[in-house]
Structures are given as C-alpha cells and as structure tokens.
Amino acid sequence: MPDAPIAVAMSGGVDSSTVAALLVRQGHRVVGMTMQLWNQRRLPELWAGAEAPVGHGRCCSLDDVYDARRVAEQIGIPYYVVNFEQQFEQHVVKPFVEEYLAGRTPVPCTLCNNYIKFDRFLDMADAAGARQIATGHYARIRYDEPSGRYQLLRGKDPAKDQTYFLFGLTQPQLARTLFPLGELTKPEVRELARSMGLAVAAKSDSQEICFVPNGDYAAFLHAYLQENDAAAPPPGPGPIVTADGRTLGEHNGVHRFTVGQRKGLRIAAAEPLYVIATDPKTQRVVVGGNGDLLRRGFFVKDVNWISIAGVSAPVRAQVKIRNKHAAAPATLHAAGGAARVEVIFDEPQRAVTPGQGAVFHDGDLVLGGGWIE
Amino acid sequence: MEHVYFDHNATTPVAPEARDAAAVCLGQVYGNASSIHHFGQAAKQKLEAARRQIAALIHAGPSEIVFTGGGTEADNMAVLGVARATGKGHIITSTIEHPAVLGPCAQLEREGFAVTRVRVGASGVVNPDDVRAALRPETVLVSVMHANNEIGTVQPIAEIARITREAGVPLHVDGVQALGKIPVDVDALGVDLYSVSAHKLYAPKGVGVLYIRKGTRLAPTDFGGHHERGHRPGTENVPGAAAFGAAAELAANTMFVESERQAALRDRLEKAVLNRISGTGVNGSCWNRTPNTSNIYFDGVDGEALVIALDLRGFAVSTGAACSSGAVTPSHVLTAIGLSDDRARASMRFSLGRLNTAAQVDALADALEASVAHLRRISVHA
C-alpha cells in the first residue's frame, strides 16, 4: 500500500499530539488512536485527598481523551479510542503487583511497551490498514545495513531519553515503529506544538506510573488486592535486620521497601541506614550502610538484543540499572544462553535492584537489555 | 471518501419534514408555550399539534403524552416515578433492557426495592410465563422493552400486559427501538407507560415522550413548574417537539413500505455475509425482529478492530450500544442470550435506515468480507 496510513498512539499529551501533527504536516495519512488502559473509576479510595478528582487529569482520564480528540479534530485525522483494559491488567498491572509481593521492584512502563504499545497497538494499527505506528517516545531508530538490524538509540534530549523503557522492542516491532521526536528536545517539541497551534502545547508532563495515584504504590497494592479478594493478602509486619542478623526494629510489609530506600525505616542510627535487600519468604528487610549497597556484579535474565545479535565473547558497554541511573562502564559476559548475561561494573554501583531493567549501551546505541535477577 | 451509515439504532438522520418543522419554531414561532400572549399561543399550538401527531402514531390520547428530554429521561421518569409513588416494593424487569431502565432499577435496589431481572434464552425473547412466575404480592412495576436495541428482538408485550393487568401491576415498556419500525398501539398492547425517543425516528436529539395511561400513579422526579401536567417542569422544547411530531406523522405514512424494504435489505446483507464469510451467524432470534436490525458474530475477529477497519473503508457500524470510549465488558445483551465473551466481542450490529440502498448493502458485504479476511490473517487477538 503506497499511501498506507500511519497509526499514531495519542495520549492527549504534548508529545504524541506533536507527533501526529508533524506527520500530517509532512503529508502522511494519519490515524489517531488513544489506548484506554485503565479505568480510573476503579479503586476510588486511592483518590481521597489526591489533587485531581477521580477520572480527571490522569492517564486514561476523560480529560486526556478529550484533549487527544480535540487535537485529532484540529489536524483533521480519523480518531479512535481503543480499549485495552483487559490486556493492560493481565500483562502490566497484575505482574506489577506480583513482583512487589515477590520482593522485587517492577518496571510497569517496560511491560506496557512490550505487551501493549508495541504489540496490541501494532495489531490495531494493522486492523486500520497501517503498516507503521508512531509514538511520542524520545528515542531514535535506525536501520544498520551491515548487520541488517534495526538499532535503537537514545533520544537527542538527555533529560527525556526514554530508551530505558524500550529495551524489550524486537526487530519486527522496531521495523514498523517511528519515533519522530527522537531528534528533538522537549523545549523544541513544545515550541513546535505552539507554532502549530496545538491546544495541548502548554500541558504539563504526565506522572511516572499512570495507574498509581500520587506514586503511592503500597496503597495501590492494598486497594487492588482488596478489590480482587486475593487469597494472599499483602504481607504483614516483619523484622528489620542487619546483614549479620541483628534485629533493629519492625516494618509494616516488605512490599513497602525497595533496595536503596532510606525513608520509612524509622530507626535511629549513627550513620544513615538503607535497605540492602528484602526477603518476602521470611518477611525480613535487611538494612546496612551506604557501602553495603555497592555491588560490582549481577545477572540479567530474559535479555532482548537490539543493536547487536548477542554476546559470545565479553563485550564492553555502559549499563544502566534504573531510569535515573547514569549508565556506568561494565563488561558483559554470556552466562548461559543468549538471554542471560553477567554484568561486571568497572566500579561498584549503588542499589542493584532485582526486578528493575538493566539496559546495555554503547554510547547512544542501545545494545539490549533484560531484567535484574 | 463516501461514508455510508448503517447505525440507525444509535441515531438517525433528521428527516427534511422534521427539520422544516423545527426551523419554523426556531424562526418566527419563538414564543414560550406557557405565555399568555400571541407569541406564546403560537408556540403552544405547535406543541399541541405535535402532541396529537405522536398520540396518533401510538394510538394514545394527547393528554397522555408527556414530552421529555429524551428516551432515557422518559425511562427514568416511568421507573422511578411508579416506584416512588408507592415507596417500597418489588420490580420486575429483564436482563436485556437498555441501561436507561437497568440504571434506575439498580438505583431503586439501593433505595430498598427488590428487583427481579427475568432471563431470556438464546432467542433473546422474554417468556411471559417467567414474568408471571416472578410476580409477588408486593410487585409495583413490570418494565420490559418492546424491541431490543442490539439484536432487534421484539418482546411479547401484549401477553405480558395481560398478565400484569390481571395482577393489577402497571407495565412500563421502553419502546425507543420499536417506534417507527413496528406498529405500536398502546391500547391494543395494553401498556400503562411507554417511552420513546425522537432521534431514533429521524427527528433531533434531546426530545422524548413518555406515554402515561390515564389513571397511572406517578411520583414526579423533577420539581419547579407545572409544565407537562407537572410531570416535566421546565420550558418546553417546542422546536424539538414539533420536529418529533412531524417525524411521527411521516413514520405513520411510510412505516409499512419502509419496513418491508429495510427487512429485504437486511436479509440481503445476512445472506451475503453468512454465505460468503465462514464462522459467522446471527445472534438472537431471526424471527420477531425489528426489520432494520441484524447482529452477527464473526468468530476470531475483534469487534472493536472491525468497527475501525470498516469505518476507514467508509462504513459506519457498531459493536452494540454506542459508547464513546470503547466498551470494557462485552455486551450484557449478548452474554444474556448465552454468547461467550469471545463471541460477544466478535459481534457486530448493523442497523439499516431509510436512506440505505441495495448497492450500499452489497458494498458493505464486500467490505466485510475483505476486512474480516484481513483481520483473521493478522489475527488481532481479542
């Protein structure tokens, strides 16, 4: 199809709105779609005291759909709301809850990209006759002739680079995806949106985890488990211990703690204490000093290789172990199959956290990534 | 691209006759129908003429016609009004009602009423014996729709009315999807309350009527004026009512010919789909349906995706009830008639109208064949 449309995932925010408008300006046929992922009327108790009333000003809220629809009207493209609530709950929300209960710290945005935005949404694009999709992610894709691979690169704006959440993209997914904002900075995008007269040009950025109000994931876990009448209630209190086994106090549930966390321990000590591990089986939260958080080596599972096919011999890279982490120099060693890697940092890094993603870089290039064991 | 409309159960285009009637009342006849003076009298005449036109279509007396802000408001007025006139008791309705009836029933349940929702079989038709069996001494209302909005099945209202009349219980019928499609005679049917909506009858949105048989006790749901015999306070929507009246007269004159024509087109569509596309079938009874409605499943196809694919090919259809942000749960009507969630999500409603032609139906069948084949090939998983 020579004039096949491009399906744009429109959230109602400034980034994806600008993407849609840019593609229209470039002469493409564009179909706008908003993914309805989560019913904000669920778990109303979480919204007590929140700044925004239920269903307003949040991801997937009526306000966002209104904004997206208005932009679509403004730029004159067909627009649809597609409902993926079921898939989102199955592939993102449930694993999010289960990971926390298992003592790990999940990254729901990566799961959403893997299973919803670059899977289910691609299917919907197909249904609409669109071979390509475009999103407002700050990242770049380029085709590398010699290797025959689609490569993923960091977005030009270091403050907005979103490749940490995109390490799960497969070659077929990358082949069909456009990131028109990859070469732009956020201020440039806002300026573009303003110059094109988009109604959402001044809209504020979205919060981190769209379905968790105010970032209070522990409250979300409780409300979600209660609503689902879970057989396993959220973990109760347990001991706070040191690595050498001394009990320092009590906590109110291991799922409230993540490696590197300092807040919420409520223990007076000579030097600041941090969580260095959690163990849901024994309900123990292990604490220690800042030095105890430092680690040189760790394993990464379910690795998805993007810009290279894998590591047979050790490979030098910079490795990022959470979204806000500055990638640190390391060596990647194959550790059983193509999908498991041992990372050895040159310098020990703080708070290597099970359940988080580890993303391997070579400069701007994203080599691949997986989940910290 | 030409866009062809096959979603007349969601709403209809306004007939020229209705548009002209409204235009008169948006132009020179702008008075308030409650005013004493010349302008008010002129508006009042338009309002009452419309009332007579609608009364004539359903064989009611003009004094039994109350204008409302639409079908949903008429349903609420009837269900809440009858229930609250007694204060407590038991209500019988069906599992395939429109939310405009299920909603107020659920609200009454929260207020202390008991509600029985009579089930239907695969045919999508209520069995009058089930209504009889559900009756209790404290039953204050039975509410069953005349024609279903999603599958078009026509309910045995006359039989149900004989049962409710015998029991001395008022019967409300949501006739929104029946009016103009099948004959409606509130006297012959024996109903006490009957809700209709203008925009399903080629008139504008925002107008409805509740027929209230003389002598039916109804507590008011709104307060603040004596309009519409105290049932619906607020300045009357004269342009809307006038358009509704004109549309009612038009329907009375054209219904029999149109019904036959649309039924033939509907059958043509079903025959083409069922012959040419595997894994398809009609949901609900094929008999006793409104002539314009067809609900078909396309196994292995995501309904939402098919609506989008067809829209981009220029055909407007729907997965069921109109919903702005996509339905989360599969249609309660389709699950009530025994469809699995998967098959309910794979179902499409086609509702024809006066402007549809055989050529359009053939083009729709072609588009369906191509889109379903495409979707099955890429297998958009439900």
Image (cartoon, rainbow, N blue to C red):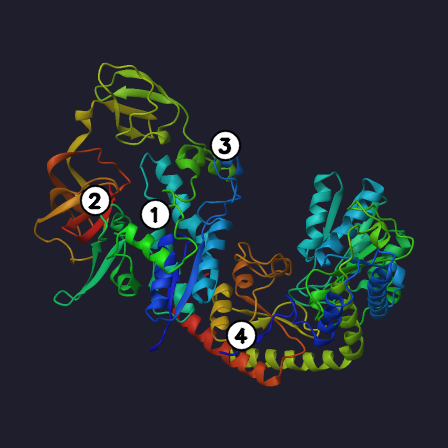
Q: Residue at x 53, y 38 (%)?
A: A44
- Element on which disc 1 rests: helix
* Residue A180 coordinates in the image, percent (x, y): 29, 60
The Cα atoms of the two marked residues, 4 and 3, are separated by 46 Å
Q: Nearer the viewer, mark 1 or mark 2?
A: 1
Instruction: Give the amino acid at mark 1.
Output: Cys
Q: Residues within 10 Å of mark 3 (few under 14, many from 20)?
A: few
The Cα atoms of the two marked residues, 2 and 3, are separated by 39 Å
Q: Tell if the residue under mark 1 belongs to the same chain as the one under mark 3.
A: yes
User: Which badge, 1 or 2, is on the more N-terminal residue?
Assistant: 1
The Cα atoms of the two marked residues, 1 and 2, are separated by 18 Å
The Cα atoms of the two marked residues, 1 and 4, are separated by 36 Å
The residue tagged 2 is: A300
The residue tagged 3 is: A49
The Cα atoms of the two marked residues, 4 and 2, are separated by 50 Å
Please state which of residues B161 and B248 is positioned toward the viewer in this rendering.
Answer: B248
